[in-house]
Amino acid sequence: MRVLLPVALVATTLAMAPVRFDREKVLRVRVQDEKQASLLNHLADTHELDFWYPDAVHHVAANMSVDFRVSEKEFRSIQFALDHNKMRYEILIHNLQEVIEKQFDVEEGIPARHSYAKYNTWDKIVAWTEKMVHKHPEMVSRIKIGTTVEDNPLYVLKIGKGNERKKAIFMDCGIHGREWIAPAFCQWFVYQAAKSYGKNKIMTKLLDGMKFYVLPVFNVDGYIWTWTKNRLWRKNRSRNPNSKCIGTDLNRNFNASWNSFPDTNLPCGETYAGPAPESEKETKAVTDFIRKHRKSLKAYITIHSYSQMLLFPYGYTSELPPNQEELARVARISTEALSSQYETRYIYGPTASTFFRTSGSSLDWAYNLGIKHTFAFELRDKGRFGFLLPESQIKSTCKETMLAVKYIAKYILRHAS
């Protein structure tokens, strides 16, 4: 498969100019049968395509909608092939650079105040973690769990009081650099939890009875790169042996059926699994922390975008987990709570049948470790903006997602042993 170079190819120097996406397009193709799926696979071999949904061409199958980015140079050729083979498609984004620039559609607020309605750089997020600890010293503490390959700190915020034996939930955001709405939610969650303690009955009960470990940005280096060089970067920034291509997909780097699907062994691919399970410093820091706190951790939640789904294990097999009925019930009620705010509709189910099959995911790893309530959110939207959700949708996305996460937490407090 040919990989769209601006996303997957290593930047050879920090002095490189930021990648621009002028007149690039995002297409949605409705694959109706296996013949059309094979044709799309062939186009991916002969053209430079960046798959947004699903995240790799080997997931493409009959009766599926497929979103991918194509350069201006390649567009006419792709369009001709789709028309010639009578494949149904629409152009979701006509000029990607314009959509990237229009993403910042909320005005700057007071300079010294952290904004929860805007996307924040890594430096601003670090400063925010310090402010949260300073403002809520009895409720919030910051733990450095490790460093990235580029020596940036990995900070977990612990929210809750007292007893280390309390039930706990671990939640991470931003395992893929370009999914900006995910870190925005983690910031929102910490802020709302800390400020509403003693004021909001449900949050007060939750924090009296349990604690949360929140990793606001999992893939720090990749997130920084999306702000400085390439808005659509997905992987981390580690160097790969015997390859000029940089980065590992951290959500393929966990020891859960690791590297068992096509494309995950290609260093230039977007879903490269790395040279070994937990080979990446970020993955190892998180797994070590979770293992250390395994006895108290009763749930694991990972926040992604996009497609409006709530997923649970498994991703690497169609077999269902032993407590599938319980997980499905919790997911159903959580999505109902979410939709009660703005009528945003989510679907839910096991990753393999609801989303697509994946190997080496944090979700499956945490479940296999023994954390029997593990969930992955794929936040807004359904493809109109994809990874480029406008800032004007941050607050509504966070408010509705908060309802779902609070329901999961309430369930854990009452029922998890």
Image (tube, helix red, strand yellow):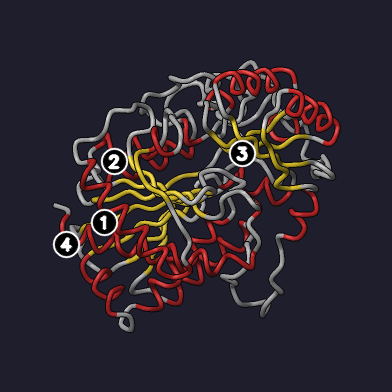
Q: Earlier in the sequence, mark 1 or mark 2?
A: 1
Marks 1 and 4 sit apart, C-alpha to C-alpha, by 12 Å
Q: Which residue is mark 4?
A: 414
Q: Position of residue 88 (x, y in %)?
A: 67, 34
Q: Position of residue 289 (x, y in %)?
A: 34, 45
Q: In front: mark 1 or mark 4?
A: 4
Marks 4 and 2 sit apart, C-alpha to C-alpha, by 23 Å
Q: Residue at x 62, y 26 (%)?
A: 269
Q: Residues within 10 Å of mark 1 (few under 14, many from 20)?
A: many
Disc 1 residue type? Ala
Query: Toward the viewer: 245 or 61?
Result: 61
For mark 3, give the secondary structure.
Answer: strand
For mark 4, give the secondary structure.
Answer: helix
Q: Which mark is residue 52?
A: 3
Query: Toward the viewer: 196 or 202?
Result: 202
For mark 2, give the secondary structure.
Answer: helix
Q: Earlier in the sequence, mark 4 or mark 3?
A: 3
When the figure is inspected, residue 221 is found, relative to residue 141, above or below; the finding is above
Disc 2 residue type? Arg
